[in-house]
Structures are given as structure tokens and as C-alpha cells.
Image (cartoon, helix red, strand yellow):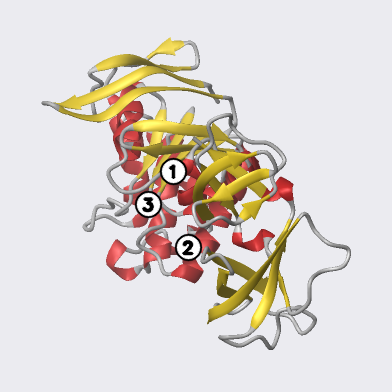
Amino acid sequence: MATVALKNLRKEYGSAVAVSDFSLEIAEGEMVAFLGPSGCGKTTTLRMIAGFITPTSGSIQIGDREVTHLLPEKRDTGMVFQRYALFPHMTMTQNVAFGLEMRKLSASERDKRVAEALEMVQMSKLADRYPRQLSGGQQQRVAIARALAVRPKVFLLDEPLSNLDAKLRVEVREEIRALQQRLGLTTIFVTHDQEEALTISDRMAIMYDGRVQQVGSADELYERPANHFVADFLGKMNFHEGRLVADGFETGNGTLIRIDQAHADAKTLGIRPERIVLSREAPIPTRQNVLPVSVESQVYMGSVIEWRLRTERGDRLACHTHNAAHDPARGLLPGDRAFASFNAQDCVSFH
């Protein structure tokens, strides 16, 4: 396996900048997710690492080798594409063997690696089938086997689960993670799906408008987002515009919220919906923020119920509670009066 070092990576298309000043170091055996909305530059960055796109400037290093201008087959990377990219006229065995043939491996070594790769993804029994005879999940497993067969130093995955249904997506992503950890593969996983990135990666690089907004572990980014975009993109958050005052933060409507710490020029306050406790009575012992609210509506989401609330000053709040018999919000209806409470340490401020 190998480390990956990206230094001031940039890609321009005429006057348009797709990726700007991307720098990141990925440790050996680490799995990093590039997460962001469509058009943010994550796939462009991945393709520069793979060698399919030439950077305008900057450098890419894999292990101790500078690979910025090397051909894809010279980089020791294996890539899995969003749309599988299997050859329809070839069996699964032939598809997996294709990259090995391009590398001029002997027939015996090629057969050995193909068998090992198909076994890794539990597709040995279907080795003689064609892509049209397989489900989407099975085809993606073969695409993974093809990438692993070349024994890459770096494993690259470009939205590999986006064409699968929800249940299968969870199953395949768990298989990818288990395989990555078992083999110790240095891996970069591109996705726009927050849940995928949170559950599959050691670290995430959040991207927007061609730039890295923040890099860190799932809990670091979720609990301590660096800016409004990261907080809003990764999960849900209540945002309130306002200003710092002596006792805390005052919203534009005049609601006072007590906070632990804040940026000196904070103008926005954020609170995660699941950190808010909703109850008919004011909680005892009292939390640091207890706001009288009215219930505007509720949305049933299975294991979670989302409540839309409004404070006495007119500020809106979303609150998530567990769908449990003992929940203090159970039985509340639109129009009911209640209390929304949360601690000062649950608040995050932004410039």
C-alpha cells in the first residue's frame, strides 16, 4: 500500500476553475471520502489522481513517486466507476482479466489473480456469466474485483453505489469497507451521499465550488463544522441570524440563546435538531436554554419524528425525537404549547 500526497492541485477548463488549490495527505491504509454536491470538483480530483485528467498545476505523489504526468497504467491505482464499465461481450472472468492482459502478465499469474479477486467479492460461482445475466449489485462486485486484480497501491471509487437501490447500497458499501480494512487498501471514495461518507470513511474531505471546505473524521466535521456550508451539508441544522450579546446570542427576532463559546464576530448560530429536547413541561433539572414554543407540524420518518416549532419571538426550530413510547414529546399535536430545551455546548457559531 502507499500514501497519497496532493499538493496545490488545480484544474481549469478555459476560464472555469473545476478544482482550486486542493492539498491533502492520505495515510497508508486510510479510507478518505470526497464528499460534496454535484459539480463541486470531487470526481475531477479523483480522475486527476487516476491519470485520466491532467492537472493545470500542482502535484500528485503516490508513495515515494511523483505521478502527476504518468499514464494511468503506470500509477498502480485501481478504479471503480459509477456505471460499472464492464465489457458486455466478455464473461466476468474475461472482464476481470482484461487489465492484467494489458499489463502483460503470464496466463498462470493472470488466472490466479482473477480467481483471487472474484473470491474476494464472492462472485466465483458466476465467473462464466455475462454482465446482462447479473444484477446491478453483482456487476458492481465484478467491477471491484477487476480493480483489485491489478493489486493497486491506491483504490479509487467514483460514486460506485449510486446506481443501486437503497438496501443493496448499504449491503455493498459494508462489503467495500470490510474488504478495504482486511486488505489494508489506501482508498479514496467519491460520493455525494452523507450517510455513505459518514459510515464508510476514516476521514472526509468536504468540497464545494472546487475547494476543500474542511477535512476531518465524521465526528469532527459533524460536531465542529468549520463553516455554514459544512454544517448545512452534513446533516440538518437550525440556523439563526443575529448577534453576540453579553448573555449569549440574540437572534434577529430577539430570542436569547446561551452559548459556551463563539467566534468574536459571529453572526449565525447553529443547533442540531437531535440536540433539542421537546416536552410538554419545562425540564427539571433545567437545561441552559429552555424556550417556550408552539407546535406547527410533525413529520413521521419511521424511527424519528421531525417537529416544526416556533418560539414566542417567532423563530422557527426543527426538532428530531425518537419514535419511542417514553418520549416526552409523544402525543403533542399541531397548535399545542411545549418547551424546546438544549444546552449551551450544543450551539455552534459561524462568521
Check disc 1 and report the residue beneath it. 229
Q: Residue pushed farthest left?
A: 14
Answer with mark 1 or mark 2, whichever residue precedes in sequence: 2
* Residue drawn at (50%, 40%) of the image: 267
Q: Nearer the viewer, mark 3 or mark 1?
A: 1
- Cα–Cα gap, marks 3 and 2: 24 Å
Q: Are marks 3 and 2 in contact (CB under 8 Å)?
A: no
List x then y, in percent, for residue 279.
73, 75
* Residue drawn at (37%, 65%) of the image: 136
Q: Residues within 10 Å of mark 1 (few under 14, many from 20)?
A: some
Residue 111 shows in this picture: no
- Which labelled disc corresponds to residue 93? 3
User: Could you tell me the amino acid type at mark 3?
Assistant: Thr
The foreground one among 145 and 211 is 211
- Which labelled disc corresponds to residue 169? 2
Q: Nearer the viewer, mark 3 or mark 2?
A: 2
Q: Quick check: 344 above or below 203?
A: below
Dot 2: what SS?
Answer: helix
- Cα–Cα gap, marks 3 and 1: 45 Å
Q: Quadrant of residue 11?
A: top left
The foreground one among 204 and 141 is 204
- Cα–Cα gap, marks 1 and 2: 26 Å
Q: Quadrant of residue 243?
A: top right
User: Could you tell me the amino acid type at mark 1?
Assistant: Phe
Dot 1: what SS?
Answer: helix
Q: Residue pushed farthest right?
A: 285
Q: Quick check: 25 above or below 283?
A: above
